[in-house]
């Protein structure tokens, strides 16, 4: 019952974070390139979702950056190239050590939706985190993509794992940089119980088989 309530609470907080992000995206100015990052920290990885939303006055310039052959269409290669360009402008560090991020997917809206200020380019990025000791840790995220024309938002999501607890978030003045302080905790004992029971049952069965073998030999 307690786990169910906790799951509903986490889901509710995540929902509020998404609603707030959508509200921020819809309110940005016509001449801004809004870049909204949401980071989810797991015990062994960090997952990043980055929405890039050009204002109406910026859309054609951004589309021109993507459409390199100027044919009016965004090919798969052009989309992948732009995703890699954005990824190259992102920095992730765990406790001061750079971690290698990978682009999992990049989704583009219809160009006309972008020209209306309604479409967001969405990147899904992940990076493995080396297994670290129980206790406090720090994750740094930095976004240097199109600094001359952008406004930035960056937030940590409520962790899905009970092993991670966010303790603080610090941003620089323009939110190109976010530092997340978090606590890594031991895995709950109940998650280990099934494996312990299986091991115990296996040991009992093995002991019984060995005893039966010894008796048959005697």
Image (spheres, grey):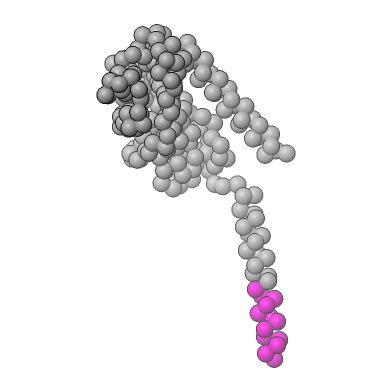
Q: Residue 189 vs residue 106: left or right?
A: right
Task: Name the image quarter holding the C terminus.
Answer: bottom right
User: Left of 85 or right of it: where is 215?
Assistant: right
Height in image: 199 above or below 148? below
Q: Compare residues 78 and 192 and report the one nearer the observer.
A: 78
Q: Position of residue 78 (x, y in %)?
A: 32, 29
Q: Residue furthest bottom?
A: 218
As drawn, the residue found furthest toward the right would be 1
Whether residue 18 appears in magenta in the rendering, the answer is: no
The span picked out in magenta is: 206-218
Q: Residue furthest left?
A: 69
Residue 144, image x and y in percent?
Answer: 31, 25
At 56% across and 47% down in the image, what residue appears? 187
Q: Which residue sits at x=62%, y=50%?
A: 191
Q: Position of residue 56 (x, y in %)?
A: 39, 10
| 35 up-or-down from 31: above or below | below
Question: Is residue 86 visible in the rendered structure shown here?
Answer: no
Which residue is depicted at the point 27% across and 24% down? 68
Residue 100 versus residue 178: which sits nearer the camera?
A: 100
- The image quadrant of residue 169 is top left
Q: Quadrant of residue 93?
A: top left
Residue 83, quarter of the rendered image? top left
Q: Residue at x 44, y 48 (%)?
A: 131
- Residue 11 position, x and y percent, is 61, 30
Asked whether 210 falls inside the magenta stretch, the response is yes
Q: Is residue 25 visible?
A: yes
What secondary structure is the stretch in magenta mostly built from?
helix
């Amino acid at each position: 019952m307690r786990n169910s309530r906790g799951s509903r609470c986490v889901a509710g907080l995540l929902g509020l974070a998404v609603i707030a992000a959508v509200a921020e995206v819809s309110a940005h100015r016509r001449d801004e390139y809004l870049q909204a990052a949401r980071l989810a920290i797991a015990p062994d990885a960090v997952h990043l979702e980055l929405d890039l939303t050009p204002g109406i006055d910026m859309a054609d310039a951004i589309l021109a950056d993507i459409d390199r052959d100027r044919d009016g269409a965004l090919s798969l290669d052009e989309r992948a190239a732009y995703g890699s360009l954005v990824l190259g402008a992102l920095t992730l560090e765990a406790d001061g050590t750079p971690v290698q991020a990978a682009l999992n997917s990049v989704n583009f809206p219809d160009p006309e939706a972008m020209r209306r200020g309604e479409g967001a380019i969405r990147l899904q990025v992940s990076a493995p985190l080396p297994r670290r000791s129980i206790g406090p840790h720090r994750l740094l995220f930095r976004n240097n993509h199109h600094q001359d024309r952008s406004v930035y938002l960056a937030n940590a999501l409520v962790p899905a794992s009970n092993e991670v607890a966010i303790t603080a978030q610090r941003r620089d003045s323009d939110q190109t940089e976010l530092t997340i302080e978090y606590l890594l905790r031991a895995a709950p004992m109940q998650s280990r119980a099934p494996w312990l029971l299986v091991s115990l049952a296996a040991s009992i069965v093995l002991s019984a088989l060995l005893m039966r073998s010894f008796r048959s030999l005697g």
